[in-house]
Image (cartoon, grey):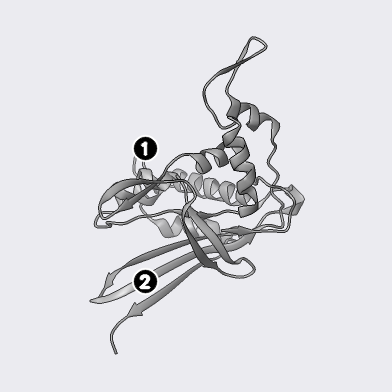
Amino acid sequence: GSRGDGDSQFGFSIVTIMDEATMDAVAYIDGKLVKMPPLSQKEVTWFPEPIGYLNTYMIIHSELATLPYTLKGVNTITYKDSWDESIFPIIEFLKSSGFTSRNDIDILGVKVKPIHLVGKLVKYDEDPKTYGALKVEARGVKEGEKTILTYILGPTTGIEEWNAGVTAVTTAYGAVAGLKCLVNELFPRGVTPPELINDPMKWLNELVKRGISIMEVEQRIKPL
C-alpha cells in the first residue's frame, strides 16, 4: 500500500499499470488457481501510519506464479494492491479508446502497439515523499491454536536527493539484497524464486541495514 501528496498519477510504468488493470487477476483458492476480474474483491486494508486505511484490489502479480508450488501445505494465496480510485476513469478511457491494446496498428506506415505508444508518451513520476508498505498475512494452526502471523515491511519513503520514489527505492534495495545473497551463495543453484532462499533472515537483514523496518505480529485465537 502507498500514500502520498504528490500530483503524479502514475508511480511507475503505465504499461505495467495497464496490465494490472486489464488482465485477469489470479488467486490460489482451495488448492486451485482461479482467475478473477482485475481490480475486483475490494477490501479496506490497514497499514501503519502515516499510511492508514487503503482500498486494496485483486490484480495479476508474479507471486502467484511460484508460491502455490513452493509453499507446501498452503491451500489459499491471494494478492491485493492499493489503488487510488481517482485513476479509474483514466483507465476506463484508455481501455475504451483502444490504447491498452497490444495488437499492431498502422500509423503512417509504421506498425505500433497502442499500449507501447502510451508507455512512451505518459511518463511516471512518483513523489519521493510518498510512503509505502508491504503486508503479508499468514493464517493457520500453530501448537493446536488458530494463529494469524502478520509481517509488515515499512512504512518507508523515497529519497528526495535522488528524486526516487518509494517504489524505485524498495525495488532497488530488494535487488541489492538479493545480489548480496547470491554472492554469499544463499540461493540454491539454478533458477529459483526468492521464497526458496536458504537463509531468509540474512536477506531481510540487508533491508534493515538500509533503513527498511520489518515487523512481526502474532495473534492467537482460542476459546475462553
Q: Is residue 64 visible?
A: yes
Q: Quadrant of the C terminus?
A: bottom left
Kind of element beneath mark 1: loop
Query: Residue at left 52%, top 22%?
Result: 103
Pinpoint residue 64: horizontal percent, then vertical percent.
38, 47
Please name whichever residue, 147 or 7, is drawn nearer the observer in this view of the structure. Answer: 7
Amino acid type assigned to the residue bearing label 1 in the image = Val
Please indicate whether residue 136 sits to the left or right of residue 111 in the image.
left
Pinpoint residue 186: horizontal percent, then vertical percent.
39, 49
Q: Label 2 belongs to which residue?
A: 148
Label 1 with label 2: CB-CB less than 8 Å: no
Please indicate whether residue 1 sits to the left or right of residue 107 in the image.
left
Q: Quadrant of the N terminus?
A: bottom right
Pinpoint residue 8: horizontal percent, then vertical percent.
72, 48
Please name whichever residue, 23 or 129, is drawn nearer the observer in this view of the structure. Answer: 23
Query: Callout 1: 10 Å neighbours few (<14), some, many (20+)?
Result: few
Query: Callout 2: 10 Å neighbours few (<14), some, many (20+)?
Result: some
- In the displayed structure, 177 sits above or below 104; it is below
Q: Label 1 belongs to which residue?
A: 191
Please indicate whether residue 209 sits to the left or right of residue 224 in the image.
right
Give the farthest residue toward the front.
96
Which of the 4 image quarters holds residue 208? bottom right
Amino acid type assigned to the residue bearing label 2 in the image = Ile
Which of the 4 image quarters holds residue 151? bottom left
* Number of disc labels: 2
Query: Residue at left 58%, top 46%?
Result: 172
Please name whichever residue, 220 or 14, is drawn nearer the observer in this view of the structure. Answer: 14
- In the displayed structure, 167 sits above or below 2; it is above
CA separation, marks 1 and 2? 31 Å
Kind of element beneath mark 2: strand
